[in-house]
Amino acid sequence: MSRFLISCGGTGGHLSPGIALGEALVARGHSATLLISNKKVDARLIEKYAHLKFLRIPGAPFSMSPVGFAKFFVKQAAAFIFGVNLVRTQRPDGIVGFGGFTTSSVIIAGALFNVPVVLHEANRVPGRAIRLLGRLARRVYLPPGIRLRDVRLSALRHMGLPVRKEIVREPREAALQSFGLDPRFSVLVVLGGSQGATSLNDWADKNAGALALEGVQVCCVTGLGKREPEVREFRTRRGEPIKAIFFPFCDRMGALLSAADLVVSRAGAGTIAELIRCTTPAILIPYPFAADNHQWANARFFEMQGGGLVLAQERLSDLTAEVRDAIFNEWLLRKFRANLLRMDRANSIDDMLNDLEELSAPAPALAQPKPA
């Protein structure tokens, strides 16, 4: 049995694959400790995973503002001390970092103690932590076709993003029933990532009635702290009752995506991986202020692979028309779903596990020479 530390806190896009990897390692008989942040989204997401071990690590996101940078510097110094003590006491056989502000301290600590460190980047534009720490890693997992200048070719592997085992396509009727949705009408799900998106929430709020008239039910996951849960009642053009549902968080994403005919979403790598796993077509609205515009690169690749469409934030006024054109076009939706099914064949969790086991295995003892 090997012991692993998995640094994955701060956002759902980092924590969800960390949970997926942790569960897969434990299923193979290994030990996994997941390092998370003190943010609300982390606390909410781990509630279902009492069988996994979590530790909260100090840290704050990088900021260019004087106050923000000072906070970042102090928290990262505390995180480094935390990481050094953790690696020294636990002596892990491997450390995996999924990027973000919780990753750097424990990766550096692992490198100092000569522990094999591994980095995983799911976005098609690698983040700051992955770029800076890549040369310390024994292995760097990147999306297909992506390279990093400072990472030697022998360390590079192309891997998909681990997806939690419960994120699977479910029977649609059961999924609809679990959310109180009417099987007679189409379902549009609106997602803003683990922390929500105010502009998408506002669009859903403003357009839910017009879409209901045409027989489209809206389910909007608003993000923790963005607004209170709400069910709004409408009527279709025929006078049939239909509703729109707003709730801050969903811990049944497999069921929600299985209920959806179409999703409107930001373009984080974690969300895209779950859309692919559940073969749910989407219109992606990349967050325009994402670091290095990485969501635009993610969305464009998704569109080029035939999983759905991309619409820029500045064209949000066109979104209602785009939804109408797609959600009632069954031929187009079938084509998207077929492409998503093809894309899901790139799931590589088993390849990742095999590689991690090889990296963490103790070196074979040298044979002693026989006495003369």
Image (cartoon, rainbow, N blue to C red):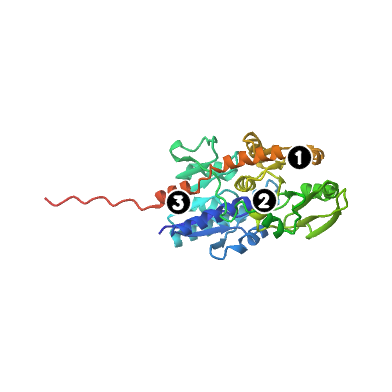
> Which of pointers 3 and 2 indicates the residue nearer the eye?
2
Q: Amino acid at mark 3?
A: Leu
How crowded is the residue under tag 2: few (<14 C-alpha within 10 Å), some, or many (20+)? many
Q: Position of residue 2 (x, y in %)?
A: 42, 57
Classify mark 1: residues with Cα within 10 Å, few (<14), some (14-19) or many (20+): some
Q: Quadrant of residue 42?
A: bottom right
Where's residue 175, x and y in %? 68, 56
Residue holding disc 3? 112
Q: Could you tell me which secondary element the residue under label 1 belongs to?
A: helix
> Is there a contact, CB below 8 Å, between mark 3 and mark 2?
no
Instruction: Tell me the crowding category of disc 3: few under 14, some 14 to 19, or many 20 or more residues within 10 angstroms, Cα based.
Output: few
Q: Which residue is at a point 78% across and 47% down the rendered structure image?
A: 199
Q: Specify whether residue 209 is in view.
A: yes
Out of 225 and 159, give the one closest to the viewer: 159
Secondary structure at numbered mark 2:
helix
In terms of sequence position, does the residue under pointer 2 or pointer 1 come before the other?
A: 2
Q: Quadrant of the N terminus?
A: bottom left
Quickly name the residue at label 1.
313
Task: Give whichever of discs 3 and 2 has the lower sequence position.
Answer: 3
Residue 258 vertical placement versus 298 (above, below): below
Identity, as a three-letter code, of the amino acid under mark 2: Leu
Label 2 and label 1: CA atoms lie apart by 22 Å
The residue under the point 77% across, 50% down is 185
Report which quarter residue 330 is drawn in. Answer: top right
Whole-percent x and y of residue 96? 50, 51
| Residue at mark 2 | 257
- At numbered mark 3, what does the secondary structure look like: helix, strand or loop? helix
Q: For marks 2 and 1, give the one nearer the viewer.
A: 2
Q: What is the distance, in whole Å, between disc 3 and disc 2 at their CAs?
A: 43 Å
